[in-house]
Image (cartoon, rainbow, N blue to C red):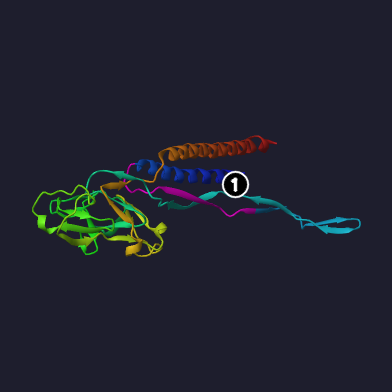
Amino acid sequence: MLRGIFTGASGMIAMQHRLDAVANNLANVDTAGYKKDIAVFKAFPELLLRRSNDNGVYTFPMGSVDTMPMVGRLGAGVELNEVYTTFEQGSMKPTGNDFDMALDGKGFFSVRTQSGERYTRNGAFYLNNEGSLVDKAGDFVLGENGPVVLQQYNFMIDQDGVIWRDASKAGEAARLVSPYEVQWENMERVDRLKIVDFAEPRYIRKQGDSYWLETPESGPATVVPGNARPKVRTGYLEASNVNAVREMVDMIEVNRAYDANSKSIQTHDTLVGRLINEIGRV
């Protein structure tokens, strides 16, 4: 009977982990580039119940026959296996800001932080006072030659992530409205955004502030080759891939499952109490 209490408790703990993932998804529904988490569970090894004092042989007057002395299988509970991140593409939201960028395809922007190089899908960038391209945390966005340095009104970034500037208008406030509407005569290549990917991206680890960290299981970050590079959409941000309605439904489902496990424990506790207080008197 105590096994039922342990099984119900494991179900409550599992639902708590799932609720943490759902709550985190809802909290980041408006975070650019966020990828939703899914809690994945696995069952404890099942128990094979056998009848005691039974060798499985049934004897009758004309002989004997073998029977199965097994009652059946019994589940022993559930536990968290992993928190899996799904990397489905989020929708593109136009912002009209030349410094906002979104990746249309697989890959990550590279950012230099105080803790080392990190990776992100959040392309909400801006220029700091020194003219360097930084993210919302003030960390440097990396190109293939190092931190990206721009001038606010004379640059453009094409779909391949190549950064161009017009050397002839370096000192003029000739703002580029769209790289497809304005053509500059003296284009000069500055750098190309460092866009990386991993051999096993499912194993990279979230670190907060929209950053990802490579792990031994994911493999090192490698620059995406030309034909496989995602398209860079300037003036856009990638929305999170969280469906708020789906997450609310999951939250209701988790709460009901948690309550069901809680009531199961209460029922087992009541039965144990009756067994001790009533049957024990006889």
Whether 131 is among the magenta residues is: no
Magenta stretch in the rendered image: 30-47
Foreground: 279 or 232?
Answer: 232
Foreground: 154 or 150?
Answer: 154
Whether 33 is among the magenta residues is: yes
Identify which residue is drawn at 14% across, 59% down.
186
Residue 178 locus on image (x, y percent): 22, 49
* Residue that lies at the very extreme toward the left in this rendered image: 171
Identify which residue is drawn at 57% across, 43% down.
5
Q: Residue 221 sits in which quadrant? A: bottom left
| Horizontal side, residue 52 vs residue 15: left or right | right
Q: Is residue 221 visible?
A: no
Quadrant occupied by the C terminus: top right
For mark 1, give the secondary structure: helix
Identify which residue is drawn at 41% across, 57% down.
202
Q: Is residue 133 visible?
A: yes
Q: Is residue 235 above or below residue 191?
A: above
Residue 194 locus on image (x, y percent): 27, 61
Residue 95 locus on image (x, y percent): 26, 43
Please tell me how crowded label 1 is: few (under 14), some (14-19), or many (20+) other residues with Cα within 10 Å: few
Residue hosting label 1:
3
Foreground: 182 or 259?
Answer: 182
